[in-house]
Amino acid sequence: MNDTEKRILRIIDDNAPRLQALADDLFTHPEQGWYETRTAAVAAGFLQSLGLNVRTGLAVTGLRASVGTGKGPNIALIGELDALKCPDHPASRNGYAHSCGHYAQMVCLLGAALALSDPEVASSLDGTATFFAVPAEEFQDAPLRELMRREHDVHCGGGKCELLRRGAFDDSDMALTAHSHMVGRDSGADLLLGNSASTGFVGKTVTIRGVASHAAASPDRGVNALNAACLGLSALGMIRETFREADCVRVHPVIREGGQAINVVPSRAVVEMQVRANKIPVIGEISEKVNNCFRGAALAIGCTAEIEDAQGYLPCPEILPTPLMFETAALLGDCDVRSIPVGVCNTASTDVGDLCAVMPVMNFTFGGSVGALHTADYAVTDPYVAHILPAKMMALLAYRLLRDGAAAAKDYIAGYSPAMSLEEYKAYCRRMSP
Ligand SMILES: [Zn+2]
């Protein structure tokens, strides 16, 4: 370990009480995606306290600040601002809770900023580290998406997608991401290095229209949209046996609207869902099968079905850890570091998939928590592992990537082949979210 690495670790250790207080503050003030104004203000204030110039208001609540020499690669260090709807969580506020652990990512990001903005550390970076707090990782429901479109010209359901669309990542050469353990969260590891594959998805809203009538006096004159919706859901159940295991298909609908009054034949029903799979063509294939279920059901009942697809997230490829990641983690002292389990697909999705599509991503996940993500059981049991250790790992990784002419970053970037260019991604957004 060299002197700069010792300095990075010492800065984070010395500031551990400040970071733990920050963790408490963010955890107890969860906010909905796109509305993370308080969290964004706390993050901006923290970065400003380090003397950094902060750009705010990126895709509504996003913000970024940079350190380094600006000569070499620019690495985006990512933290997510949003909480999610989880009213049963003991720490929920207005129905929202940090049950995906995104607040811990913010601590990781700001802790890394603390160390990397130290003048002695910053001057050793042959490139730029950009601290990027991004909004709305959790895909939002259709009504909120429509509202965001109207009021803020937000086209995409996820924050990173919207930031990519708006060009906020145009100067990024690669990204460093971290998350509370997702796959293998019960492995007991403090850090899992690498990025497990995960599914992508399309958002789908089915609006079924029938004819209202008195539900008791004249149901014969009505056309029941709720019945068509239920029949569509039954058909969907019956095609599930055609979903191949290897494709990690998930289709999970909710009935958003199923009638207004119990004494009126429902004339409108709305079913909303996500159609997920681990390959883009399969998402399209399953999406078409699902459409047929609802088109056929509508036809059978005499309704019409209008189907609207929204741009979701792209599937994540599996990205195995590099020796650099293990060498970096070895500096962290006594902790349990492992590789992601190889060949395991996370059936959930993340807009990190969209980042992976256009630039190299280096990812690790961290432990220190119990309970499944997105549930009331999620709780941090080891604040050091959940809050401090990830900050050290992120800071050290950025330093090791950017030191010595940024040789490691250049190497990683050269060895990665993105699925599309940024311009191709923006064209994809224009197609999917015009
Ligand atoms: Zn998450």
Image (spheres, grey):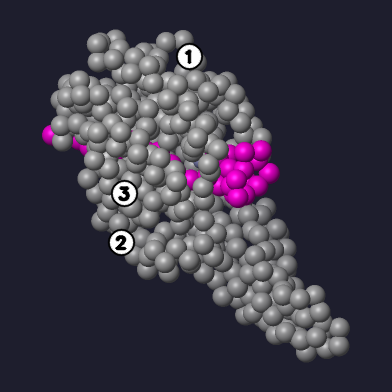
Residue tagged 3: 56
- 98 part of magenta stretch: yes
Quadrant of the image containing the C terminus: bottom left
- 141 part of magenta stretch: no
Residue tagged 2: 427
Q: Is residue 318 left or right of residue 216?
A: left
Q: Position of residue 196 (x, y in %)?
A: 47, 35
Q: Which label lies toward us, 3 or 1?
A: 3
Q: Position of residue 340 (x, y in %)?
A: 48, 27
Q: CA distance from mark 3 to mark 2?
A: 25 Å
User: Residue 356: in sight, yes or no?
Assistant: no
Q: Is residue 179 above or below residue 1?
A: below
In the rendered structure, which amino acid carries the disc numbered 3?
Thr
Q: Is residue 412 above or below residue 55?
A: above
Q: Which residues are magenta?
A: 71-100
Q: Position of residue 338 (x, y in %)?
A: 47, 20
Q: Main secondary structure of the magenta part?
A: loop
In the rendered structure, which amino acid carries the disc numbered 2?
Ala
Query: Dot 3, how many residues are within 10 Å of its Cα: few (below 14), some (14-19), or many (20+)?
Result: some
Question: Which numbered dot is residue 59?
Answer: none
Say which label, 2 or 1, has the lower sequence index: 1
- Identify the element where label 2 is drawn: helix
- Identify the element where label 3 is drawn: strand
